Image: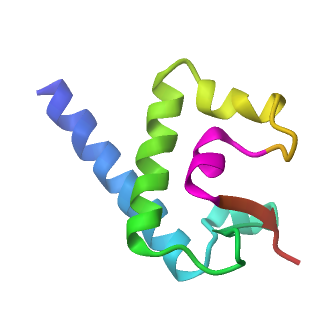
Amino acid sequence: MRTLFQFWVLTWVGAYFVYCWTKSGQTLAMKAWRLRVETMHGQRLSVAQAVVRYLAAVLGLALLGVGFLWMLVDPQRQFLHDRLLRTRVVRAD
């Protein structure tokens, strides 16, 4: 039962992120910090790109945060999932 609940929560959280990233490029927290996620060409993410980005971020977090710690050694300060998926987080001025 617990595993089912965790899957349910991850699914709904993922739906929120995918919706926000494809509609405006920003979640509520990203709006507050004036950040936006986009492709390397400055376009909004497609649904497929957003789903894969979310799943890759969850995997990077599950692997002891390696996907996020990657930014400490990346020359452009990108997360591993952004580097692999050719997306980026930029300032939304």
Q: In this view, does 17 lie to the left or right of 75?
A: left
Q: In which quarter of the image is residue 87?
A: bottom right
Residue 31 percent location from the top left of the image: 73, 69
Residues shaded magenta: 78-86
Please give the name of the residue rendered at 54% of the width and 73% of the height, measured from the top-left corner.
45
Give the answer, above or below, for where 39 lies relative to 64.
below
Q: Is residue 8 left or right of residue 24?
A: left
The answer to whether residue 83 is magenta is yes
Residue 7 percent location from the top left of the image: 24, 39
Please give the name of the residue rendered at 44% of the width and 72% of the height, measured from the top-left corner.
19
Please give the name of the residue rendered at 83% of the width and 43% of the height, measured from the top-left corner.
77
Q: How is the rendered protein coloured?
A: rainbow
Residue 1 percent location from the top left of the image: 10, 27
Residue in front for this viewpoint, 11 or 66: 66
**Which residue appears farthest toward the top when viewing the image?**
64
Give the answer, above or below, for where 18 lies relative to 73.
below
The answer to whether residue 62 is magenta is no
Q: In this view, does 85 lie to the left or right of 88?
A: left
Magenta segment, principal secondary structure? helix
Give the answer, above or below, for where 72 lies relative to 76.
above
Q: How many labels does the image show?
A: 0
Residue 34 percent location from the top left of the image: 81, 67
Please give the name of the residue rendered at 46% of the width and 25% of the height, measured from the top-left corner.
62
Q: In this view, does 12 lie to the left or right of 70?
A: left
Q: Quadrant of the C terminus?
A: bottom right
